[in-house]
Amino acid sequence: QLQLQESGPGLVKPSETLSLTCTVSGGSISSSNYYWGWIRQPPGKGLEWIGSIFYSGSTYYNPSLKSRVTISVDTSKNQFSLTLSSVTAADTAVYYCARECSGSSCKSFDYWGQGTLVTVSS
Amino acid sequence: QTVVTQEPSFSVSPGGTVTLTCGLSSGSVSTSYYPSWYQQTPGQTPRTLIYSTNTRSSGVPDRFSGSILGNKAALNITGAQADDESDYYCVLYMGSGIWMFGGGTKLTVL
């Protein structure tokens, strides 16, 4: 059974960089059928797609966050990572990693990590 | 800028039927947007219900169904149960690798 697990600091200071890693187990990140994505949810609010990456390193980002976001992949560790620079309190959220099924017959986020709360505060 | 629209809240009686919708502030939703639907209870991870407009995810009861209704994607829930009380999110594939979530609908069963 595929599992995704987010890890990283739960507290980040304003203006600094948020860094999270998602470790994938029970399956290979190097599959041609999937992208790997980050999605966030501020407390009490809705879901927001941040971006996705293919195992080759090809990336897509939410235009509203693109200037501050980098997503990278390490296939040797079966992990992908998120960095978000110049954070403010508005970036406080639960951050989820998820598998994005890229085929036209399955296009969706089909597996999710449990999520990790990142608070931006001094 | 285009926004994905959902009803902020909806109420249904136990055993009743409800249709939640997912639209665009500009334009119509079609199957080309590959609408998918997610159920989330407070403090929990979203659960995939429907993908590619109308395909139920594994283990999802057939009380849940998806379709295109007019110019919107729709999630139909029949025989509503107490544990259907959740937030429901749709997401649309906008093309060029870009996804956009709706604001979510809070469904109350009472």
Image (spheres, rainbow, N blue to C red):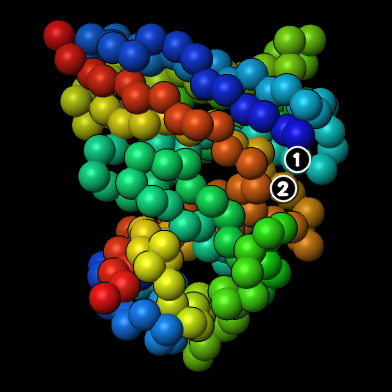
Q: Secondary structure at mark 2?
A: strand
Under tag 1, what secondary structure?
A: strand
State whether residue B73 appears in this view.
no
Amino acid carrying label 2: it is Cys
A97 with respect to B103 (left or right):
right
Q: Residue A34 location in percent, x, y? A: 75, 40
Whether marks 2 and 1 lie on the same chain: yes
Location of residue A86 with respect to B27 vertically, above or below: above
Q: Is residue A7 left or right of residue B13?
A: right
Q: Is residue A106 above or below residue A4?
A: below
Residue depicted at 32% across the width and 80% down the height: B12
Say whether disc 2 or disc 1 marks the residue closer to the N-terminus.
1
Q: Residue at x 53, y 62 (%)?
A: B37
Q: Which mark is residue B70?
A: none
- Residue kind at label 1, given as amino acid type: Tyr
Q: Is residue B45 above or below residue B92?
A: above
Task: Tell me the chain of label 2.
Answer: A
Q: Position of residue B107 (x, y in %)?
A: 32, 68
**Residue B11 lies in quadrant:** bottom left
Q: CA distance from mark 2 to mark 1?
A: 5 Å
Chain of the residue displaying label 1: A
Q: Which corner quadrant holds the N terminus of chain B? A: bottom left
* Residue labelled with disc 2: A101
Question: Depth check: A62 or B92 in front?
Answer: B92
Residue A20 locus on image (x, y percent)? 48, 16
Q: Which residue lies under the disc numbered 1?
A: A34
Q: Residue at x 64, y 53 (%)?
A: A108
